[in-house]
Amino acid sequence: QVQLVESGGGLVQPGGSLRLSCAASGFAFSESFMSWIRRPPGKDLEWVSSINGDGSRTMYADSVKGRFTISRDNAKNTLYLQMNSLKAEDTAVYYCDKSATRGQGTQVTVSA
């Protein structure tokens, strides 16, 4: 079955960086469109970024464009999200997503 395991979250100061990882198994990862979504505290899920199977196309929400970079390593069945210039409003639980199947999420907290 589809299994997604996110990692890499933590507490970081505004302006800092984090790299999230998502280890995928149970499906044809290299053929799969993948996304990162997030849930800020007390708010609904927000789409953050998506990438196609071979990594040639990426898409970003306006709120993260220019600061976040999505990538994938199909040899390792792993999805990444490099987050730079983090802001307090990026605080959320981040999930990797394949067709509405998600992992347990990883908490990102941006605070001084």
Image (spheres, grey):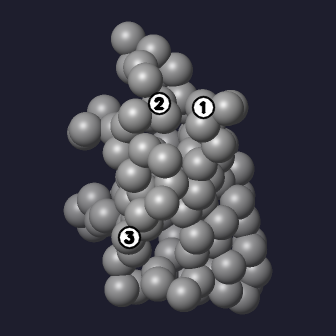
Q: Decide: marks 1, 3 in contact (CB < 8 A)?
A: no
Residue found at the very far top of the displayed protein: 1
SS for callout 3? strand
Q: At 51% across and 75% down in the image, what residue appears?
A: 90
Q: Tell me, yes or no, whether the two marked residues, 1 and 2, touch with CB atoms within 8 Å.
A: yes
State the residue in front, 73 or 81.
73
Q: Which residue is mark 2?
A: 29
Q: Residue at x 60, y 37 (%)?
A: 74
**Residue drawn 65% across and 43% down?**
73
Residue 52: which disc? none
Identify the amino acid type marked 3.
Met
* Residue 111 horizontal side relative to residue 48, left or right: right
Q: Position of residue 79 (x, y in %)?
A: 57, 45
Q: Which amino acid type is shown beneath numbered disc 1?
A: Asn
Q: Earlier in the sequence, mark 3 or mark 2?
A: 2
Residue 77 badge: 1
Decide if residue 10 is in sight here: yes
Q: Are marks 3 and 2 in contact (CB under 8 Å)?
A: no
Which residue is under mark 3? 59
- Name the image quarter holding the N terminus: top left
State how far apart marks 1 and 3 are (Cα): 20 Å
Give the image quarter of residue 12.
Answer: bottom right
Query: Which of disc 2 and disc 1 is earlier in sequence?
Result: 2
